[in-house]
Image (tube, helix red, strand yellow):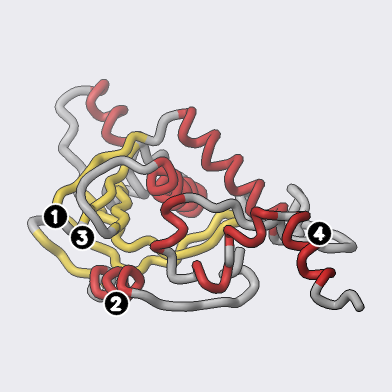
Amino acid sequence: MKVVEGWRSANQHTERGDIVHEHSDLAGYEVAKGITLLRALPVFSERLGLNGKCDIVEVRPLTPALSPADGERVSAGRVRGIGTLFPVEFKLGKRRQWVNDDAQLCAQAMCLEEMFGTPIPRGAVFHADSKRRREVEFTAELRARTEAAGRGLQALLGLSESSDLKSEIAPLPGAVFKPACEECSLFDICLPKVTEAGNRVERQARQLFEI
């Protein structure tokens, strides 16, 4: 939530992330092996109240239908005769599954579905250290988890589920310390160990000004 408040800091992990995204952050497109790669594609969803950018969206050519059944299957994932969309998210580290990565990729797919009016059943996370992809299927469970995360984000931003501004914005919740926090670039700003201590820290702070 410090990012929501406008805080920005850097460490070795954010610098490495910038390097990994250096190419995908350059808006534009290229064609490789018959697949069009859209870089830094802006996406949004009015229904979810989300917007952002996809690292890469692959536009894959349509496969010629061999039968009516094949034609229905191919048409289900195409964009107005252009091809099928396949979002790819770049991440640091070796190939391994993280729920938050899957939800982020799923949110991109749901934005693309709303923008282009086409179903997107799967995408992939590219892990920079191992240079391997991990394909992600956008199941009903993952979609529900992603929508729930979006609603939670809107609540933290002081927005109702209908996207109308609240009269008053509730205070942001305190940070919860986790082992991964110490590797975060905002660790010294967020102070999760302090905020998690709660009332004990408040009492000690008051004691500093007692006479």
Q: Earlier in the sequence, mark 3 or mark 1?
A: 3
* Circle number at residue 170: 4
Q: Secondary structure at mark 2?
A: loop
Say what amino acid the circle numbered 3 marks. Thr
Which is in the foreground here, disc 3 or disc 2? Answer: 2
In the picture of the structure, the residue carrying the numbered disc 2 is: 26
Instruction: List x then y, in percent, for residue 139.
Output: 42, 30
Label 3 vs label 4: CA separation? 44 Å
* Circle number at residue 131: 1
Q: Secondary structure at mark 1?
A: loop
Q: Is residue 52 above or below residue 155?
A: below
Q: Secondary structure at mark 4?
A: loop
Q: Secondary structure at mark 3?
A: strand
Q: Earlier in the sequence, mark 3 or mark 4?
A: 3
The answer to which quarter of the image holds residue 136 is top left
Residue drawn at (48%, 46%) of the image: 110
Report crowding for label 1: few under 14, some 14 to 19, many 20 or more residues within 10 A (C-alpha): few
In the picture of the structure, the residue carrying the numbered disc 3 is: 36
Label 2 vs label 4: CA separation? 37 Å
Residue drawn at (26%, 29%) of the image: 71
Instruction: List x then y, in percent, for residue 135.
Output: 25, 40
